[in-house]
Amino acid sequence: MPIPFQITSPRFKDGETIPVAYTCEGDDLPPPLHWEGEPPGTRSFALVMQDPDAPDPGNPQTTWTHWVLYNLPPNIHDIPESMLPESLPAGAREALNDWKHMGYGGPCPPIGRHRYFYRVFALDTVLPDMGHVTWKQLEAAMQGHILAQTELIGTYEKVQGFKDRQKEEVRHHRRH
């Protein structure tokens, strides 16, 4: 029996807290990810990481896109720990995140505990290099080409020490 299309991380399970190392309070580099079980005919993968709880989980107003990759080759099933943009597989592309730059921007919620959705899409095509494309533009280009998708949800809330450091930095800047 075939494996269902799924994404996992050896650093956190679905619904668990994302370790600090993969957030703005740590190294701000992506966690290791693994997916498998894609359907036959998959010619590329796209990956997006988004926070649907921005800016406040008690009153979410937008889905914030933290990271977008596309044209990951069909033989690639892993994002290695702390992968840097220059180590992307040949042919893979990054799209703009909501900070308007390429690359990974880790969890850094301003208020409360947020959910972060890591989604992988199995596509029946290799998309053209679209340059500095946004998630919305990529999502539109993927329409009609998605064979399957899977997701892993992690959560994160800033640790108190980081909040205290932020307050101290603000006080320091006001004094100088």
Image (cartoon, helix red, strand yellow):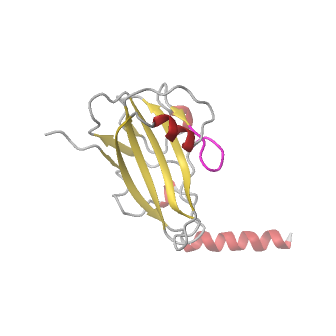
Q: Quadrant of the C terminus?
A: bottom right
Specify whether residue 158 is in view: yes
Q: Position of residue 108 (x, y in %)?
A: 57, 61
Closest to the observer, 125 or 95: 125
Q: Position of residue 77 (x, y in %)?
A: 35, 36
User: Would you say 42 lies left or right of 108 here?
Assistant: left
As for residue 124 lying within the magenta part, the answer is no
Q: In this view, which residue lies farthest toward the left?
A: 1
> Chief secondary structure of the magenta span?
loop
Query: How many marks are shown on the rendered structure?
Result: 0
User: Would you say 78 lies left or right of 167 here?
Assistant: left
User: Would you say 40 lies left or right of 85 here?
Assistant: left
Specify whether residue 28 is in view: no
Q: Position of residue 121 (x, y in %)?
A: 39, 40
Up/down of 173 relative to 1, above or below: below
Up/down of 44 relative to 65, above or below: above
User: Would you say 27 lies left or right of 119 here?
Assistant: right
Q: Position of residue 92 (x, y in %)?
A: 49, 30
Quarter of the image for residue 40 reads top left
As for residue 99 lying within the magenta part, the answer is yes
Region in magenta: 95-103
